[in-house]
Image: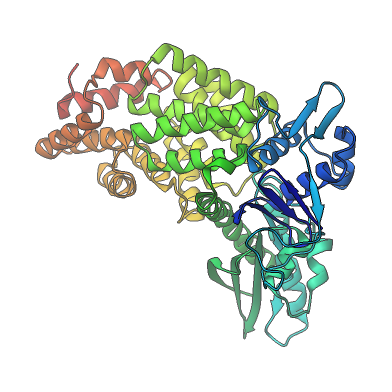
Amino acid sequence: MIYQFEDYSLDVDRQELRRGTELVDVEPQVLDLLQYLIRYRERVVSKDDLIEHVWHGRIVSESTLTSRITAVRHAIGDSGDHQRLIRTIARKGIRFVGEVRGDQSSPPGVSANSTLPSSSAATPWLPDKPSIAVLPFANMSGDAEQEYFADGMAEEILTALSHCNSLFVTARNSSFTYKGKAIDVRQVGRELGVRYLLEGSVRRSGDRLRFTAQLIDATSGAQIWADRFDGGTNDVFELQDRIAESVVAVIEPNVQLAEIERMKRKPVANLDAYDLLLRAQQFEYEFTQESFDAALRCLEQALKIDPNYAQAMALAAYCYAERSQQGWLKDRVLETAEGIRLAARAVELAKNDANVLWMAAYAARQLSMDAQLAKELAYRSLQLNPNSAIALAMTGWIEVALADPVKALEHLRRADQLSPCDPRTWFINTGMGMAYFQTSRYDESIVWLKKALAQNPHSAVALRVLAACLANLGQKDRASEAIRELLKIEPHLTISDLRARMLMAHGKLWTKFSEALRLAGLPE
């Protein structure tokens, strides 16, 4: 069946939406929703109808439902203001009101004999966040005893992944139906309704075990990440724990980067609230004054689509906090207040989301300068997701500010071990530099700060600490050079201005730091 309306055509069998001859890039669930609205266009469709028939009875938040309806409108050139094709009926539901022509012919410009990729109308539901399934791992040893290790390894990783709120993880009972079968990753992705698959294998040689894993994009079959891990058989449970935490720590940032790349291929007109969040993350990673402006504009748009989008609120609060840290706030009073408001509201809406909590912790640290709140939020984030390198880094940074460098280094070292590929690795390395500065181990501090600046040359914080370390080592010329580079980023920075931004820092840390910066040549 092909439904035609205005200059659009929806091919139900091929699950394709076209405008004229151009294919519109639309998520499968958005197509399902559009198809349902058109099919039952003679009546008003209620929220309960949509949940039962499009979400198959799953629990769906109001914000998710609103986001998907908005995505449908965007796909067909409509909006909530105009409601030309999809009309909201107050307290009743929604209805497709466009004139529809239904026939069996192919859409304009497409031959009836075309061999276009086909996915049945039963394309599974995809959640509105990255989805992943852990397939049963292959036992390559020919040793039946290793089957238990392989299955246990998969279960450990599944359990650990379940702590990542940013991921939708398919249950073991679904993914383990493929145990012992030759698979096509694209087919498995469609059947399980996931975009990413983790598969692996276990091999034993003597008293050594080797585990290999790879993360695959199930829509294209492309490999996103792969690695191997070795260990002895003397403590299998310890080995499982170590591998699980290492694998899980790299999956979340790699999936996030893959999602950003996928978003780049999507037409701007079809971006929904989640896509705008991804675009904001991309701009935030670029870490310039202009990119932070762009990130906040994207998040403002996302919140117009979904006013209760906690992740967008938290990222906006984080962006305001980073602008404050860098000296890039345009209106300190207004932007600080807005960042604090967004962080508080995000925590209120998503108090069990680990990513929301660490971003809110950073806002509490940098904007409201509330040490107790920042510490509470950061440690709660870490408790919810113990394998999050960025949550570990945040607790480390807070312990630095509270003058506990020993505990700070413990957290930051583990973050560094877990996250060799996180886009915010520079944040971890700068924290290491600050902790070593606190303990007067300036040479070690400089090593970490140079790593941070190689990854993010715009980091004013790393340059400040570098200048302080060089000054305390008596290298005044190099310290002055670091200050000159710092003032290119923050032309009006003074010690008194910096003090206003570091009120949360312990007194003895501030004294040591400010004296070193004076020695390096930073103006009063």
Nearer to us in this view, 454 or 12: 12
* Residue 434 position in % (x across, y down): 35, 37
Look at the picture and state if 234 lies above or below 497: below
Q: State how many labels appear.
A: 0
Residue in view at x 16 percent, y 29 percent: 520
| The furthest residue to the top | 333
| The furthest residue to the left | 477
* Residue 401 position in % (x across, y down): 43, 28
Residue in view at x 70 percent, y 75 percent: 184
Residue in view at x 33 percent, y 22 percent: 510
Look at the picture and state if 61 lies above or below 258: above
How was this image coloured?
rainbow
Q: Dividing the image into 4 quarters, which one contains the C terminus?
A: top left
Nearer to us in this view, 44 or 366: 44
- Report which quarter residue 41 is drawn in: top right
Residue 117 in view of the camera: yes
Residue 509 lies left or right of residue 265; in this view the side is left
Q: Dividing the image into 4 quarters, which one contains the N terminus?
A: bottom right
* Residue 237 position in % (x across, y down): 69, 65
Residue 169 in view of the camera: no
* Residue 282 position in % (x across, y down): 46, 44
Nearer to us in this view, 256 or 513: 256
| The furthest residue to the bottom | 142
Residue 504 lies left or right of residue 391; in this view the side is left
